[in-house]
Each structure stands twice: as C-alpha cells, then as structure tokens.
Image: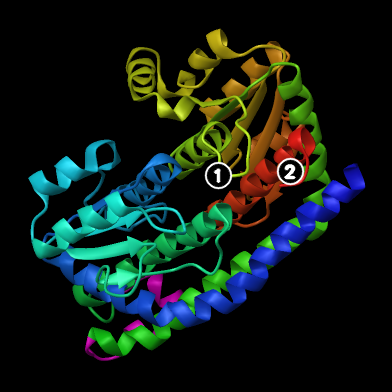
Amino acid sequence: MARWLARRVRQLLLERNTLSARFFPEESPKVAAICRRMAERFFCGGRLLAFGRGSYATDAQHVSVEFIHPVIVGKRALPALDLSLAFERWIEAIVTPQDIVMGFGPPEGDPAVCAALAVAGRRGALTLSLPGREGDADYAVSTPSADPFVHQEFLEVLYHTLWETVHVFLEHRQLPQDDIGETAVFYPFLRSEHVDLRQLEPEVARSIVMKAREDERLRAEVADAQAELIAEAAEAIAGRVMRGGKLICFGNGGSATDANDLALDCVLPPAGYHPIPAISLALEPANLTAIANDIGQEAMFLRQLIPHAREKDIAVAISTSGGSTNVMLALEEARKHGALTVGLLGYDGGEVVRRQLVDYAVVVHSDEIPRIQEVQASVYHVLRQALEVVLHGET
C-alpha cells in the first residue's frame, strides 16, 4: 500500500504541473490587464471586497490578508475585507463605484456569488468572478480542472499574482523613475521613461508565467523527494483517525487561512469524499484575540491545544518559515499530549525541523512566501486525497 500510495501522490502532484503549464501562459495577459485596472481603483481610493462560501471563504480570507498585510517588506497596505459571513447584505450596504469586488466559488460556479457580483457591477464596482464565464464580471476565469482541489490551488496562484502585480502598477505610478528600489531587480522595465500602463502588461504577463513555472519546479521537487513521506504521513494520520482522533490545524496569516481550508476540506469535503474529523484553531477569532490580549500572541494556539488535544489526535502546523513561536509552542504542547505532529513548512523547515518538533515534515524549499503557500496548498490537498484512499479506498 505504501509504495502504491507514494506513486499516487507523485502522480497527483505532477498532473497539476501539466495543467499549470497550459493554463497560466493563456491566462496571464488577462490577469495582467485586470491588475492594471485594480491598481487604478486602489489609486483612486477603492477597496478590495472578497467573499465565498464554504472552503472558498478561506480564499477570501487569504486574499484579504495578502493585501492588508503584505509579506514583502516595504509594500504598502491596501484596503481589503473578507465579506463571506454575510456577503449579500454587505455588498448591498457598502459597495461604492471605486471598489473591487472578488467572488470565489467551486469549478461549476456559485449562483449566490454570481448574483452578488452582478449587484456590485451595477453599482459601478470592478468585478472578478473566480470562477465565472465571460460576461459574468469584468474578469472571469474558468480553471482547467473540475477537481475542486486543483481548481482552488490555481485560484490561489491567481490571487497571489494579482496582489504582486497590482503593486507593480502602483509603484510605477507613484515612485520616481530613479527610486524604484528592489522592484528594479524583478521588473527592470520600470526604469524606462513614463509610459501608458497598458504598455507594461506584456512584460507583467511574462512575469506571471515565470511565477507559475517556479511553482511547477517546486511541485516536481516535492513529488520526487517527498512523495513517500507524504504517503507515510497519510497512513499515520489515518491510523489516528481510525482510533477516533481528529486533525487540529493551525498557522499564521495566509497559513491560517490554509489551516482553515484543510479543516473544511476534511469536514465539508467535495462530492465523493467522506468527512474526517478536523478543527482549525485559526477559525476562533474570539479565542485568538482574547489570548493574544491577555497572555500574548505566543500562546494563541498553545492555550487552545491544552483543552482540545488528545493522544489520538493529529496536530498539523502550516508555516512558511518554520520559526513562528506560537506554532512551535503549540507543537510542543501537542507532543506532551501524545498527539501525532505534522508540519507543512517552507525555507529549510526552520526551527520546527532543527528542533525535531514534528513526526512528519514536508518542506517546500523556497524563500518566496507566495510560492511556498501555493505549493503547500497542493501538498495538503494531495494529503487529503491520500487520506481518502487509505480510509475509504480510491476516490
């Protein structure tokens, strides 16, 4: 079983690369064009308003935190909100003509999301339908896979590149030509004389393809070097689940939204999958803010693990750095309870690996946070698929 499962994990990761290599070169010119239009809205005081239902609400959470709290030092915070909790009412109440409204849904689309985008469009907002058909919004995309996991991973790549590329257009408008800083390393064309922003779109589109290519390289690296490890982790997790255990997921920032997504993929799975017990400690805003305020942010996950963790459980930490104190303290606490520990990590695995805090560490060897998170999404989705195979047979 283990060898077959490892081969299956590798196959699933590489199949994503085949689709990616076709999809992003075709889509990148349209992405570049909508990024320019988004930048123009931000420049005029607009906001990004995002929403979705079920696991797609985690995409709205993720895109909001990327724009509000950019991971690249020196980038400005841009106004963004996740409206998923009551998006129909919020769209009616707060949308202005300067805003950008982004709706997320499954591969087949979501009628409620489409209806809300239509309302926003009638109010003059710039609309993005992910997914959607041409004419549904100012930008609509249909990803090349009906698999909801692959679909969602490609959406994550898209909205990361939206965030990265919007900043390129904003900086070109706002910064003197001799003061563009580190941006010049990646976008040397910004040193040219002032041009219509439309003239930047072909070069920006090529940069989007380069980012997708880097994802493909990293996925292939994980497939070749860590497929067996992922398969072993799936079997170990399944063993705890069969004993009545649950997944306890956690992470910070964008990794918090990925922890939420993994937990929802377990308890609210796609058609053909069976529910698996799981919770996300990042889905508890009252607990998180109370603990951070009263004790300190280092205890945000630790404090929750103390009452929740059991010996038969699985603690799943998602971290790009592998060095967040609150993540490491939570893993230490999970071990005290006898829980299985799993880490989805970036860079070299950080202190989590050096201090051997997890039983299974899947590391995306990159120092680019968006690329790490994009490949981590593939990893935890493939892990979820492997769990379905181990627990219930082939999906």
- Image coordinates of residue 13 in percent, x first then y, are 70, 59
Inspect this view and state whether residue 5 appears.
Answer: yes
Kind of element beneath mark 2:
helix
Q: Nearer the viewer, residue 86 or 364?
A: 86
Magenta extent: 180-196
Residue 248 located within the stretch drawn in magenta? no
Q: Nearer the viewer, residue 35 or 390?
A: 390
Q: Name which residue type carries label 2.
A: Ala
- Looking at the image, residue 211 sits to the left or right of residue 231; the answer is left
**Labelled disc at residue 386:** 2
Total residue callouts: 2
Q: Name which residue type carries label 1.
A: Pro
Please tell me in which quadrant of the rendered image residue 249 appears.
top right
- Image coordinates of residue 274 in percent, x first then y, are 63, 34
Residue 187 located within the stretch drawn in magenta? yes
Q: Is residue 49 above or below residue 37?
A: above
Q: Which residue shows up at 34% across the image and 69% down it?
A: 140
Please tell me in which quadrant of the rendered image residue 117 appears.
bottom left
- Looking at the image, residue 138 sits to the left or right of residue 312; the answer is left
Sort mark 2 into few (<14), some (14-19) or many (20+) by Cα contacts within 10 Å: many
Q: Nearer the viewer, mark 2 or mark 1?
A: 1
Q: Which residue shows up at 60% across the image and 24% down it?
A: 277
Kind of element beneath mark 1:
loop
The residue that mark 1 highlights is 270
Marks 2 and 1, how far apart at CA:
14 Å
- Image coordinates of residue 302 in percent, x first then y, are 53, 17
**From the image, which quarter does the N terminus lie in?**
top right
Mark 2 or 1, nearer chain start: 1
Q: Is residue 270 above or below residue 330?
A: below
